[in-house]
Image (cartoon, grey):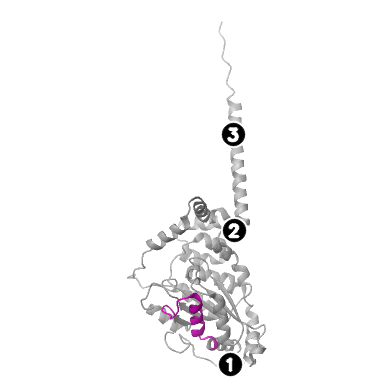
Amino acid sequence: MTFSSPTPPVADDNDTAMRTELKVLGVLALLLLAVEGGLTLSEDRLSADVHHLRSIPSLTSRIRNREESPAVAMQRLSKRSAAQWDSDATQVLFLTSAQQVDQFDLATFQRDLEQQGNRPVELIALHPAKARISEWSYLYRNFVSDRDRAPDLLVIGFEERDLRDAPTAAPSELARFYDCRLDDLNPLSRDDLRSVEDWSEFMLSNASATFTHRRRVEQQLLATLIPGYATSREQIHSAAKPPIPDSPVAPEYQRLQELTALAQRDHVEVVLVALPSRNQAPLDPQLIQIAQQSQFTLMDCRRPSADTPAALSHYLATWLPLQTLLERHDRRLIPAGAQDTTRWASGDRSPLR
């Protein structure tokens, strides 16, 4: 007598396996959503630099509207006594990097500018980590110029090759913090996003805080688990950083010229300040030539007689030709009765200050 074996329930097993897989995927999706939500809500606490990057919109919102500038200029020109200054403070937008701003005492810089100009100064300092011309150009265009804002002075503190054309080192931060949108596609594709990987990083960072901060989270976890990790990492990074070699190819400054032209179109006085650095070679003659042609102020402060942040801040505030620049700025904003003034590459009419 022959007995047939029962047919195994293949369909039921497959359904069970599929349900299990769907549950696992659902748990992972919920976990990712929880991590994304947690990082989005706690971005400010990830690092001081992220907190500063997220504060850029609120800091730049303090810059007065472009339409208000002529009225403020008229008030400044019509007043004679320091006691009359009230709401028409001199607005100085200071762009540099976190590495450079550590050399400054911003409170001293603002106070000494006020003493030199005999009027209130509102200093708005923006200094993202590792920022250079690639970041400064998007920052000024997207948060200042495109929003119809115009400070009186734009001061850029730079080191070595910060002003030379080069792609951004952080496409994820451009997407997350610099308000890059469709109208930035041309400079993005021309200057910064030159590969599929760059575009992928940019698009994913635009949509995900988790992707943007993956390296920061990794470093914080390692710093928590390994005592002295952060200090050792910084020391190794500094020691391994090679000096910048001379390039046989002439540097290009297209982005700098676009930024200064945009600021000057808004009647903003532009001041570039070479800050103390390891590079003691003379400034690039091409940069000096651009300063002369574009008629903005260029200052070489790489060898100041100052060895503390407060002393360097006092040195720069005292040397900056604030009164000359501000008077020229105000007169250019008021067509009636204004006289044409000759621009030069330095406040004292020398080729380089």
Q: Name the residue type under label 3.
A: Met
* Residue at the outermost top position: 1
Please state which of residues 164 and 159 is positioned toward the viewer in this rendering: 159
Can you tell which mark lies on residue 18?
A: 3
Please state which of residues 92 and 167 is positioned toward the viewer in this rendering: 92
Residue at 56 percent of width and 62 percent of height: 50
Residue ID for mark 2:
43
Can you tell which mark lies on residue 1?
A: none
Residue 119 figure quarter: bottom right
Residue at 54 percent of width and 63 percent of height: 49
Judge whether residue 179 can be spotted in this image: no
Work out whether 257 lies above or below 339: above
Measured as percent of width and height from the top left, residue 202 is found at: 52, 58
Element at label 3: helix
Q: Name the residue type under label 2.
A: Glu
Q: Where does the magenta region start and end?
A: 301-323
Q: Earlier in the sequence, mark 3 or mark 2?
A: 3
Work out whether 206 lies above or below 245: above
Element at label 2: helix
Measured as percent of width and height from the top left, residue 220 is found at: 52, 54
Q: CA distance from mark 1 to mark 2?
A: 49 Å
Q: Earlier in the sequence, mark 1 or mark 3?
A: 3
Label 3 Cα crowd, 10 Å radius (few <14 / some 14-19 / many 20+)? few
Please state which of residues 333 and 45 is positioned toward the viewer in this rendering: 45
Residue ID for mark 1:
338
